[in-house]
Each structure stands twice: as structure tokens, then as C-alpha cells.
Image (cartoon, grey):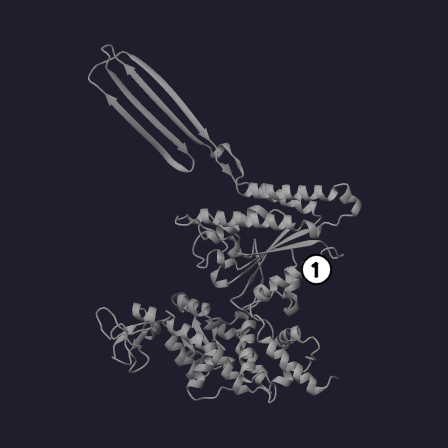
Amino acid sequence: MPDTSINQLLLERAIFEHVRLPLRSDRHQQYLSFYVDAGNLDRLRSKEWQVIFGRRGTGKTLLLGALHDSLRAEIGSDTGRNLPLSFTGYEFRASPIGIEVPEKIRGLAYFQIFMESLATQLSDAVESLTHTSWNQKLLGVHSRRIERVEKLAAEIVGHSQSGAPLSAYSEFERSHKSTEVFKDQSSFDLSIAATSDVRQPLRLGAGVTADKRSGSERRSVYEEVQSSPAIPRFIEARNKMVKLLDELQLSTLYILIDEWSALDATATTSIQPLFSELLKISFGGSDRIAIKIAANPHQVRFSNLTRRHYGLELGADIFVAANLDYSKMAQHEQLKFYESLLRKRLLVNEPSLDVRDAVATMFDEDAYRELVNGSEGVPRRFLQIFNSLAEYYDYRVVPPWGIDAVRDAITGTLVADIEVNFQSSASPLRVQLQDMATRARSRIFYVRKEDAAQLSDSIEELLEARLIHDIPHADVPPRIRLAFDAYRIDYGLWLYWVQGTGQTPRIDESLQFSDDPETVWGQTLHASQADSADLITCANCDAQFSRSERPYKIRGLCPNCYRDPRLAGAAGVSTPDQPE
């Protein structure tokens, strides 16, 4: 065993250095060093097309990065030659300046950029993937292989961008000019032009000139012009891709796309479905190519919902590998998970540190469990709270960190942002939700299934802002889930509300399902109360107004007196018709 005092100094120094480590995994890129597996990595090695769902900070990028690094480390070993290539949705976005581009053209352009980047990465991988002896290099075997790979890569880009003409999509232009000359030299000219283009409606045009004299001679001229635009050939691109994998002696290509929602953060246009459809056309027919996507579940749209269905169908074309918003771990497993995560990060700068008792050394009893509760299953949030505690205690572990300090760190670090989101949210449910949560001292609330459609927009908005979280259907008692959907209020927000009433929360009391029907009914949001919950009474001028009023939605101000309606005596804001 190492000397206790020396290990304490190493631990405190490791904590000091930990605060300076980036929270976002794409900024430290030490994916395998920091990754704690909960069974997802092996699942992602499947050749199925898979998606990882999760909101910000849940570990999507870290999981994809760990998959990439683990597969890359195995190249050349007996486990197989699988090449992972990583991309982000932001890489594909490019638009002309000052020109409005239709959604479908934009989606095609994004996909063509992706194909170009894919071909470039494959070309760049030649040196690391090919093992050539000195005599093969001398005979030019290595250089010829590089040439073949680069040619295939160029052909992949060509097929996905310029493609090749198709006569079925040709544009025809036919013109007919008829001239009739009369005996007394008068003339009558008629010109007709018609254009037939499969991409445009039929166009007809005519021009007439005439004088009053009659004539007797007619001459006709016909002209036809045909042009064939190039059509991208995505299936040919796939065939070339398989040949390229053969050339590199690879068994499977793993395409990893992070930040999928960057293609269209609103998930309301046809860009994501079109990109998905092009992925399916280009790679869907090959068992040599596996695609893994990481996306925010509230900002994703793999397919359209019209009769002309296109895109990737969830559960048929692509499958959910993991939903990081839903932790399937029991609490004791979560405690171990976050302890392992913390140990890995502490060891980065102090590899000689004995971390076996690090958590027990740092925290009082129940304080560490409260930290895990406050993280809400979001690793980045756990690390934010931990860093806040470290700074509060000046990076020292004596005395141990207590539960009151942990709760202050939860509210101080996170609730400022959460409360701003809650107040600025357009949801009419927040007043009702806060009153119900503090009265019942429970984070659980219910929505009747018959009210679900009416409240869906408000619930979705609160979910997206992390103010509430889904409770998986299977975790809800059968007697309740038959008639209700269940949700939980974010722990940090609930803690903030309860502390505001002067009450002291007890650990674990906030997630207990009740057997009493009256209690369940008292924890139920009702659509009939949503309209009244939407009204605010100004503390300055007593005016009552809707939360949807523009001054309140944009700046949180009463539309009558232009002051903060929550604070009596608040200073006003100057407006053209209301001086301060």
C-alpha cells in the first residue's frame, strides 16, 4: 500500500489537473482512455446499420470515438481488418452565398460532399493499411496499388457527383418555321418552338408577322437539339467502393457519422430524409459497409411521412443500438460506472495514483450518491458538478466533501441555466408543474393518455430543454401505465424548487411511485388547466397576460409596463411609446 499522505497529495494534484481537462470528448480525443463500457461497444461492432440516440453530454461522441479507436487498433491483428472512418454532420454543410437553394438540392449537395470526404479518407488510408516488402516496393507493386486505389477513389467521387448521361432524362428542343410567299410578294411568317424537358412542364411559344397581300409558295424548316445532363450513379459508386475494399484487403468499412442533426437541426425539412435515402441507395446493398449514426432524438428525421416514402426506416433499415438518455443501470451500477469514469480521468495526469479508494476519500457518506443523482445519467453533467465541488474545496479532500456542498454545486452549476430555460419556455405547463412538484415532494408526474396529443408540444419542449425526462414505459407500474404516461422533473430543478420552500429533500424520496389513486391524480398534468397555467399576473402593474405575448417571450417583460413581472419594483425598459 502506498503512503497515505503521499497518495492524498497525488489525489489533490490529480483533481487540480482534472478541472483543466476538456469536458467535450472531441476536444481531448482520448476516447478509449476515458471510455467506460456499459455493453454498448460490442453491440456497435455488428454489421447492422445502427443509431445511437442521446441528448447533449450523454456520451455519443465518446462512444463513436471509442469504437473508431478500438477497430483501428485491431487492423493487422488476427481479429480482422475492419476500417472505421469518422465524420460529423457539420463537415457536409456548404451553401452558395446569396442564393436560395431548394431543400432537395441542398440535401444532394451535402451527400456529395460526404462522398468526396469518404473517398479522400480512403485514399489517405492506403499507407497505413498496405504492408509491402522492400522487393515489392522495388518492383513498383506498392506504387501501382496506390495508383489503383486513388483511381477508384476518384471514380467514386465522379459517380456520386457528375455521374453519366441517361437518354431517358434528356432535354429535347424542337423548332419549326414555316414561311409562305404569295404571288404579289406579300408574306406571312409563323414560328413555333416547343421544349420538352422531363424536369419542367411543356413550353410552347409562337411568333406571327403578316401583311395584307396573298401568296402561293410555302417553305418549312425543322430543327431539333438534344442535351443530356449527367446523372449521379450512386450504385456504381457502391460497386467501386467494394472494389476499393478488396484492393485494401479490408473485410468491413465502418462509416461513423456524429452530429447527424447538424444536417438540419429543425428536423422539419427533407434534407435528413434525402441524405438517408442516398445512404441507402449507395451502401444498402452491401454487407461490407456498416453505418453508425449518433443523433439527438429530438432533432432527427430519417424518413419522410408522405405516400412517396423515402429515407431510412427505423427498425427496418436502421436499428437503435443504444439510447443514452435511458440508463438501464441500477443505482449501484451507476455508482460504479461514474467511479470508473472518475478514476480514468484522474489517472491521466497522475498515473502513479492509487485510485481504489479515491471516491471514499473525497466524499462523505451519501454525498457521492447525491452527486450521481444530480447528474441525471449525463456524464458531462457529472463532471461539471465534480469540477464545481473541486473548486469550492480548493482541490483538497480534507475534510471530505459533504452532501450540502454537493447540493449547492448541483443547483449553482446547473440550475441557473435550467431556470432560464424554464422561464423562457413557451410551455404553459410550468406553473402547474412547479406547484405540483413542491406540494407532492415528488419528481414524478403523469399525463393521461387522452391528454397526450393536446399536451405533446409542451411536453416535447420541456424534454428538449432537459427540464423533464422520460420514464421508460417498462419502469412504470402496470396499473399506472395503462392510463398514464410518466415523466420525471430534472433533479437539479426539483432540488432548487424544494430548497426554495425551506424544505430539506431526503435522498431517493423523489422517485417513488404511489399506490394511492388520489396521489397519482394529484401528480397528473391536465390539458384543461394548461390555458389557465399560461397566464401571468405582473407583480408591478397587476396586469394579467399570456406567456405567449411577444415582449415576454423575447425578453421576459410584461407587455403592459415593460418590467420583469416576477419582481415587484423592477426597473422598466424604454420603448418608443413608453418612456422609462
Label 1 sits on residue: 73
Query: x and y percent of residue 513 in the render?
Result: 51, 79
Say which of 477 and 157 sits in front.
157
Find the residue positioned furthest to the right.
135
Residue 207 left/right relative to 494: left
Q: Total label count?
A: 1
Question: Which quadrant would the N terminus be assigned to in this image?
Answer: bottom right
Question: Which quadrant would the C terminus be assigned to in this image?
Answer: bottom left
Q: Is residue 448 visible?
A: yes
Find the residue positioned furthest to the left.
212
Does residue 73 sit above or below 496 in this rendering? above
The residue that appears at 77% across and 41% down in the rendered structure is: 139
Find the residue positioned furthest to the front.
138
Query: x and y percent of residue 373 in the render?
Result: 54, 79
Does residue 451 sit above or below 538 in this rendering? above
Say which of 199 and 90 sits in front.
90
- Find numbered disc 1 in the image and state the secondary structure of the residue it sits on: helix
Q: Is residue 331 visible?
A: no
Query: x and y percent of residue 522 in the render?
Result: 41, 80
Say which of 269 and 141 sits in front.
141
- Asked which quadrant contains residue 22, the reply is bottom right
Say which of 110 and 194 sits in front.
110
The residue that appears at 45% across and 88% down in the rendered structure is: 503
Looking at numbered disc 1 in the image, what kind of residue is underneath it? Ala
- Asked which quadrant contains residue 195, the reply is top left
